[in-house]
Every structure is written in structure tokens, then in C-alpha cells.
Amino acid sequence: MKKIWIICLLGLSLGSFLAADERGVEIMTQVEKRLESPAEKSDLTMTITDRRGRERQRELALYNLKEGEEEYSLMFFTSPADVAGVGFLTRDEEGQESNQWLYMASLGRTRRIASSSKDDSFMGSDFSYEDLEPRDVEDDQHEFLREELVDGVLCWVVESIPRRESSYSRRVCWVDSESLILRRVDFYDHNDELLKQLIASDIQQIQGYWMALAMEMTNLQRDQSTLLLWQNVEFPQDLQQDQFTVGKLEAGL
Amino acid sequence: MKKIVLLMLFSLTAGLFAEQNISGDFYLHGSLGDLDEGKWNDLWMSFEPQITLQQEDIKLLASGKMEVQQGLWQPEFDLGLLNLDFSGATGRWIIGQQEIRWGQSLALPVLDVICPRDYSNLFSGDPRESVVPVPALSWSYDLNWAMVEALYIFQHRPNVLPLAPGDSLPDGVEFREASDVIQGPADGEYGTRLRFFLPFGDLGLALYYGWEDTPLYLQRIEMQEDNAVLVVSEDYYRLFLSGLDAAIPMGPLLFRLETAMLWNRSFAPSDVGQSTLKSHQWMGLLGVDWMDSQWNIVTEIMSSYRLQEGQYVEEEPMQCSLAGELAYSSFSGLWQWSISGLFNMINYDWYTGVKMSHSPYDGLNLEIGVGIPRGDEDFFSTVEEDYMGYLNCRYSF
């Protein structure tokens, strides 16, 4: 009888685990397939605040393009004046490592960036290059944890454990059930300590596409945060792959 | 020629630009030349405005430097950049005074020979100060994974050297300055480059037919009114370079390679009365970098040999230098520290520089540094007494 109970319990827990796992994958697949504009142009303000409350503000012009599995991004610093003109190009082409170039305006030189630098901080902010990279559903093992209200909005809480090398041991995501935007993400380090927390706000529908116009990443271990604010968001139809080149990076805005 | 270019630029831009962006720099520089005596022996202040006018794909860029030097309180104005930059279906065109940078080297140039250098500002702590813009027409065409570039330089600019060559000659020696090497369009400098941006790395092929930026000095004895006079004449010679460069990321490292052949290059003779020596020269550079958001480590080794019909003229390399930089930046550039060095492995001359910069507010950058050149034989020996300490203040708006 004891054996039967154990088998029943194992069966039940395995069944609920699989169900949670499937639901987690289903939610993250919806997030991945969320209706997004293939092309985007926007202005971004990045404010970095350190533990002593000192602030640094950077303004950037951003161009993004998604063509099937391929993604392209071009960004230029527009302010402050001493970094204006610095540009950054990323080309994520199918079956290849992400290729990145940095244009140093003061030297008039373009520098290829080594790919593993993606684990590092993006422009001194609390976002790493990995945080800015899109993740495929298959990159992680997902598990649905619970439903929770965040600012009065129903969110699905999903835990994602990376299957490939990552700077995090796991992520816990609060997915907005209406817009499918990640309202909050908790990032855990390899000691399973909470390392960073991302909070998305000012969620709006622009030309039919949902967007979070404010994102704040807090590094809880370093007590430092970075706030990103999007403005002048446009979805241009004429943005082409051939505009994401080193030539365009060097020509500037 | 210069006036024609200026007139062309102004007539092209007159009434063209509706939207204007104005930015500028205010740059204050001072240097302490001799630490033993502990006095300011060289102080100057410079104002460097830069203006950009832009309408869609057309850009006009102008910059200059107004400099007031201690003991010489009359301001001098140097035109820096003045060019019209146009991007369209035919590619990107830039006409006017511009900075052209080639290759992958960050400290020891092999392919980066287009623009001359201002060696009087080499240790000022700001790399922008050392490149001298040249009047040119340049064109580039983007092919998504490749880029074709071509350029024509219509006025030769030599390197700015810390000592005027005629100054240090003893009495009785006659010095003859070089005349302008570009007399007509065919005398100009030409260059072309093909760059590939491939998944495993960047590759570049380069060809350049120009003029040396540093003159050669020939000595000969001339009879003048029954007297034998030693004449030192200054001349610039043609330079024909072909080369290739590569930047290959491997894990956390970036490998940079440059190689160049300088065909039939002219070298100064050692004896009075001899004409220039001619031989091919090979130059090669290997650089390895590691960079994250706070640390930047750059290392480079460069070597060159003189060749003659495939044989080494000299068993020892003509030039072999090692350069490196270690830099750290805290909190988006609030504080930056760096230490850099250059070591000539042939005659053991060296240079080392340490600097610290602080940016208390966005746009304001304060920098203090020490540059110590030491040498007996090469360029460092000529500037050994100078450029010991400097203080820079830059405000960008």
C-alpha cells in the first residue's frame, strides 16, 4: 500500500511539474511571439545612479530591425557633448555569434568588439549586453510558478533556468497577461542570490504595438540603478537591413 | 587650391541648411617642462570651437584652434576640420579638410599613414591633438558586408616636428627648405581601401601612393665664391604602400594585425655627398586587447625590416617597438586612470605616461598627467626635456 501511495504522489507531482513546465513554455512562447514592430526608431535617455546618489545621464538615438531570426541594432550617443557621436552596431545573424562594432568618434575609428564582452555592463550601466539580447524560448527551461497582481494587472510568474552559458543561474519573470510585456524580472547570480531587478513601467500601446516606455534595472548587490526612458517612438516602414552597416555607423546620424 | 576649396564649400552650403546643431570645445592646456626646477615653462590656452550644420544626409563640419602661448601673447588661429560630408545613392563623399584613419593600430601606426602627426602635441594626453587633418576628397561605398573607399589628397601636409630642422645647425651650414611637392593634380596623393566585415572578423586591403610626411636631409659640399660650404637640403619623397589589416575576436580577446610593404622607399644616407638609399620595407604589427565596461588593456608589437630583391639588407630589424596601455574607468567616466608605455626594442629608448581624469559634470573633463620620454638616439631624445607634466581642462557643449 505504501508503495502505491508513493507512486501516486510521484505521479501527481510529476504531472503538476509537467503542467507547470508546459504552461511556462506556453507563456514564454506567447511573449516571444508578441506582436512587435519589425522596425523601431526611438530616442532613449539613460540615467545611471550610483550608491552615493550621483547621477550620470546619457541620451541615445536607437534603430532596431527584426527580419525573421535576424536582428540588427544601431545606436548613437547624442548627449552629453563629450560622448556625442559614439556609436554601437550589433548584427545578430542566423547561425552566427552576435557581431558588434563600436565607433569611437573622438578617434574617428571603428573597433570590433570581442563577443564574450556581452556578459559585461553595457556602457557602464546596470544592463549587461546579455540583458539587451533577445532570448529564444529554447534557451531556457521554463516553469510557471503562480499568478500575481502587479499594479492591479494580472501577471503570470514564470521561472526560467538557462540551458546555455549565462551570467545568471535563473530569472523570475512577471509577464503582463494583457500586453505580454515583462513587468518585472528578478535575476539571480550563480550563488542563487538576487543580483538584479528589472521593473518596466509606463506601458502603452503605440500604433497597435505594446511597449514599456520606462525600464529600471537595479543592481541590488552594488546598490546602483539605471533608468531607461523611451521617447519619440516610431515604427518606420522603410528601415532596411543595409542601413545597419559599419558605413552607417561611421557616417553617424 | 585651399582658397578654391573654401569657396566651393561656402557656396555649396550657403542657404542650404535649415536645421543647425552647434557644439564646441573649450580646451585649456598647460605643461610643466622640467620637474627639477619646478616651474611652468610652457603654458598655453587654446579655444577649439567645432560647428556642425546638418540637413538630412548633408553635413558641414568645421573646427579650429585659437591658441595663446606664454611669452607670445598674440593669438594664433589654426584651421582644423572644414569639410562637407554628403551621403546618398552614390555613396558617402567628403570634400575638404578631414581626418583619415586607416588600419587597426591604436599606438604604433603601420597603415595609418594618410594624415600627418603633430609631434609637438604628442604627449598632451589627448589623442585628437596629434592627427593633422588633410585637404582631400574621399569617397566610400557601403556594400552591407564590405566597404570600398577611395581618396585623393590635393595638398601635402608634413608632420609637425618639435624642432625646426634649420634651427639646430651650426654657423656656416646652409639649409635649403623643401619646396611644395604638389605642383599639379598629378602630384597629389591617392589611396584606396577595401574593407570586409565578416562573422569571424574584419579584414582590410589598402593601397596608397603619396608623399612621406617626414623629410629626408641630404648633405653635400658646394663651392660658393671659392669657399666650400656644407649644404643641408630638405626633400620629401614618394611613398608607395600596400597592406592589409585584420581584427579577429577570439573569446574575450581581440587580435589586431597589420602588415604593409613600402615599395622602393627612400632612406637618408649616412655620408656627405651621397644620394638617398632605396629599398623595400616590410612592416608588421600584432595587437591583443581585452576590454570590458571598466577595464581596457591594449598591447601592440610592431617590427619593420628593409628588404632588397627578397633578401634582408640588415639581419636586425630596422624598427621594433612595444606599446601598451592599461586603463580603468569608474562610474561612466567619473574617474579614469591610465598608464601607457612605449619601448623601442632596438635602442632601448622609452616613453611612459600616467594620467588621471575626472568628469565632475557631464561635458566637463579635467585631466592631469605625466609623460616621461627618455632616449639617446631616436625621437624621444629630441623631446626628452619637454612634456613632463600637463594639466588639461575640456568643456564640451
Image (cartoon, coloured by chain):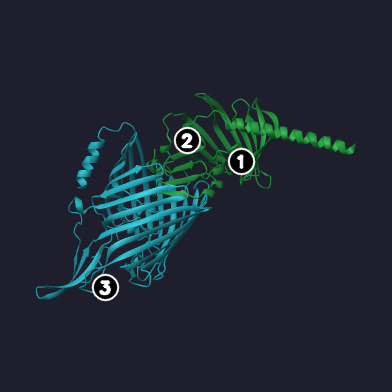
Chain colours: A green, B cyan
In space, the residues marked 3 and 2 are separated at their CA atoms by 60 Å
* Amino acid at the residue labelled 3: Ser
Kindly check if marks 1 and 2 are in contact, taking CB atoms under 8 A apart as contact.
no
Does residue B300 lie above or below B361 as drawn?
below
Looking at this rendering, what residue extends furthest in the right direction? A1
Q: Nearer the viewer, residue B385 or B327?
A: B327
Label 1: chain?
Answer: A
Task: Tell me the quarter of the image containing the C terminus of chain B.
Answer: top left
Q: Is residue A115 visible?
A: yes
Q: Amino acid at mark 1?
A: Asp
- Callout 1 environment at 10 Å: few (<14), some (14 to 19), or many (20+)? some
In the visual, does A78 lie left or right of B190?
right
Camera-nearest label, 1 or 2: 1
Residue B201 in the image: state x and y as whole percent: 45, 50
Q: Which residue is mark 1?
A: A139
In this rendering, do the residues under marks 3 and 1 share a single chain?
no
> Foreground mark, 3 or 1?
1
Instruction: Give the residue pinned by disc 3.
Output: B270
- Residue B297 can be seen in this image: no
CB under 8 Å between callouts 3 and 1? no
Callout 3–callout 2 Cβ contact below 8 Å: no
Nearer the camera: disc 3 or disc 2 = 2
Q: Is residue B139 above or below residue A201?
A: below
The count of marks equals: 3
Q: Position of residue A15 (x, y in %)?
A: 76, 33
In the visual, does A38 lie left or right of B277?
Answer: right
Residue A253's spot in the image, x, y percent?
39, 38
Res A107 label: none
For marks 1 and 2, give the CA distance: 22 Å
Rendered residue at 37%/62% (across/down):
B283
Q: Secondary structure at mark 1?
A: helix
Which residue is disc 2 drawn over? A64
